[in-house]
Amino acid sequence: MIFYKKKIVGIILLILVISIGIFYVIFNIPILKSPTSGVILTKINESGIPKGMIIHLSDKDFEEFPSLAPIIRDNTKRGIVYANGTRIDYSIKLSWEDKEKFISKYYPMESVNYTGKSEYFEYKGNYYSYTPPFQL
């Protein structure tokens, strides 16, 4: 009788280990870890300084958010041009972790939700408006 109890416990443990393994595999599929949020950046090709909160970007910002670099620092990503070239839109995908960091860093309590002013990035004299992160 003890032999059968040990065998049943062994089978239950095996089923539990296999179930945990399947659960791990299912929730580690790359498609489930793909970016789930996005931000739209708009380069403003007009003279003058926009009215609103301006955040001056540095190399530290590009290290923290590498998806900003090809658009703002390197100027290698193509965007959608409109308004006779005075505006160029770019989209950026963010992971959930980056979304939370982006919100805490670039949307302080004094942001558009509270003051009605827009936020802008500035880098080497170029200005970019940006949207709050949204779910894709």
Image (cartoon, rainbow, N blue to C red):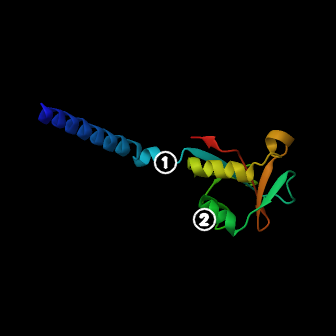
Give the camera-side residue of 3 and 81: 3
Q: Is residue 130 left or right of residue 1?
A: right
Q: Residue at x 80, y 45 (%)?
A: 109
**Quadrant of the snapshot with the C terminus:** top right
Q: For the view shown, which residue lies furthest in the top direction? A: 1
Q: Which residue is mark 2?
A: 76
Give the camera-side residue of 55 and 22: 22
Real-space Cα distance between discs 2 and 1?
Answer: 23 Å
Q: Residue at x 68, y 67 (%)?
A: 60
Seen in the picture, residue 15 relative to 84 is either above or below; the reply is above
Say what amino acid the circle numbered 1 marks: Ser
For mark 2, does the 10 Å Cα neighbourhood hold few (<14), some (14 to 19), or many (20 or more) residues?
A: few
Seen in the picture, residue 27 relative to 57 is either above or below; the reply is above
Q: Residue at x 69, y 48 (%)?
A: 103
Say what amino acid the circle numbered 2 marks: Thr
Q: Earlier in the sequence, mark 2 or mark 1?
A: 1
Question: Which of the two discs, 2 and 1, sits closer to the camera?
Answer: 1
Q: Is residue 50 left or right of residue 12?
A: right
Give the camera-side residue of 134 and 23: 23
Q: Residue at x 80, y 66 (%)?
A: 125
Q: Which residue is mark 1?
A: 34
Q: Is residue 67 left or right of residue 130?
A: left
Give the camera-side residue of 99 and 120: 99
Q: Residue 65: x percent and y percent?
A: 63, 59
Q: Residue 7: x percent and y percent?
A: 16, 36
Q: Residue 56: x percent and y percent?
A: 78, 62
Q: Residue 55, labelled with which disc?
A: none
**Quadrant of the snapshot with the N terminus:** top left
